[in-house]
Amino acid sequence: MKANFAHKSIFAFVLAALIDQLHKFYMIKILGWQGGEFITVTPFFDYVLVWNPGISYGLFAAIPAWGLIGIMLLACAGLTYWWATSPSNLVRWGLAVTLGGAVGNIIDRFIYGAVADFFSFHAFGYNWYIFNLADVAIALGLAALVWDMFTSKGSET
């Protein structure tokens, strides 16, 4: 059972990275967006292309892309070890989806030197950070880990 679910979580990993990269490929290579494009979708949501040279919220933007890639690869190695040794299916799924999103953003750094972000939510003068589908995968994976943390009784789920 554990090996079968491992394959399913690997599928979730691949799907998270693939959906993110296909979206970015379409927007950048097919539609030709380069940065600064802006489409108002609703009064609280804009579709844009912003290049993020840092990590979340642009943190550590002064660190070169190769340095951020190194840090992210180390983090991914640790998460992969956790994935491989976890007895919990929910934890494995959460880690797989998180890793898929992280790999999507690492690929951006290799290709472009920065991460392509597209989705901008705002209301009442407050702008939430601009994010991409890889970030959505990371957030979903982390939500699964938090859910497991509060609902797990220490046995295999």
Image (spheres, rainbow, N blue to C red):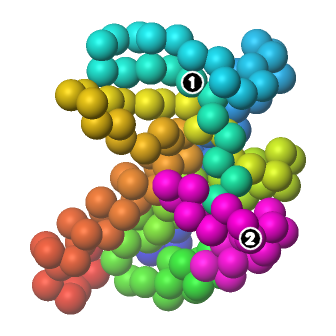
> Mark 2 or 1 closer to N-term?
1
Q: Position of residue 61 (x, y in %)?
A: 67, 62
Within 10 Å of disc 1 (Cα), the crowding (few <14, some 14-19, many 20+) is many
Main SS class of the magenta portion in the image: helix
CA distance separating discs 2 and 1: 24 Å
Kind of residue indicated by mark 2: Ile
Q: Which mark is residue 48?
A: 1
Find numbered disc 2 in the image and state the secondary structure of the residue it sits on.
loop
Quadrant occupied by the N terminus: bottom left
In the image, is residue 92 part of the stretch drawn in magenta? Answer: no
Compared with 35, 136 (above or below) is: below
Which region of the structure is painted magenta?
A: 55-75
Q: Which mark is residue 35?
A: none
Q: Which residue is mark 2?
A: 63
Whether residue 16 is situated above or below residue 4 in the rendered picture? above
Tell which tag, 2 or 1, sits nearer the viewer.
Answer: 2
Q: Residue at position x 37%, y 52% from top? A: 140
Q: Nearer the viewer, residue 14 or 56?
A: 56
